Image: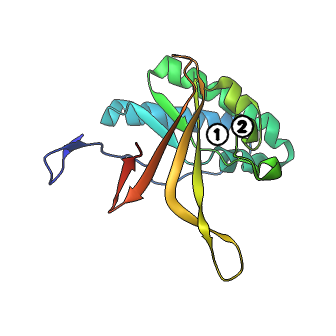
Amino acid sequence: VSQSRYGVNIPVFYLPERILNFTRVAETLAWLRKKIVEAKETFGCDVVFIGNLQYIANLFTERQVQALDVISRYLKVFAETLGVAIVLIAHIQSPEDDKRPKMRNVRGSQMITAEASIVLVVVRRKSREKDELGEYLISNKSRIFIEKNRRLGTVTHIGYEYKNGHFWEEE
């Protein structure tokens, strides 16, 4: 954690120099664990963000669902044994009938949400205005839906708006 010009402590991020492409799930898991341990021991890392789990599993295109299952399971084990929080960012499939996305819309594998302690679904709101092609414009307003919460059991939503360079919670 370092001091920012505003006097507030901000986190310092660590990124591996390069991400290697492996041909087997076991190699990928070993590399991920090694990098998590390295970040924890060297920089005191407590939270790991994995930008897109599907990209990791896409390395194994023939058995992507099985690869996602195994990787999801082991990431949970890594989090528990190494004492870090792991945040996975996953794409969602388009929901049916233009309804809001839900936990079941996570692409690739249901194991991702089954292994997760908390599942958040972020949805950008459409504006009431349309562009010249008749498509709805996307607004600066969004909602975070807490779809799953093993720790507290609470499922709810939070509205927020991006304004003047900051996210503001809606009242």
Residue at left offset 44%, top offset 21%? 83
Q: Amino acid at mark 2?
A: Val
Residue 16 in view of the camera: no
SS under mark 1: helix
SS under mark 2: helix
The tag on residue 28 is 1
Q: Is residue 160 above or below residue 73?
A: below
Side (left or right) of 129 relative to 96:
left
Q: Is residue 116 above or below residue 42?
A: above
Residue 20 in view of the camera: yes
Q: Which residue is mark 2?
A: 25
Q: Amino acid at mark 1?
A: Thr
Question: Which residue ends up furthest to the right in the rendered image?
Answer: 62
The reply to whether callout 1 and callout 2 are in contact (CB within 8 Å) is yes
Q: Which quadrant is home to the C terminus?
A: top left
Question: Which residue ends up furthest to the bottom in the rendered image?
Answer: 132
**Toward the viewer: 120 or 14?**
120
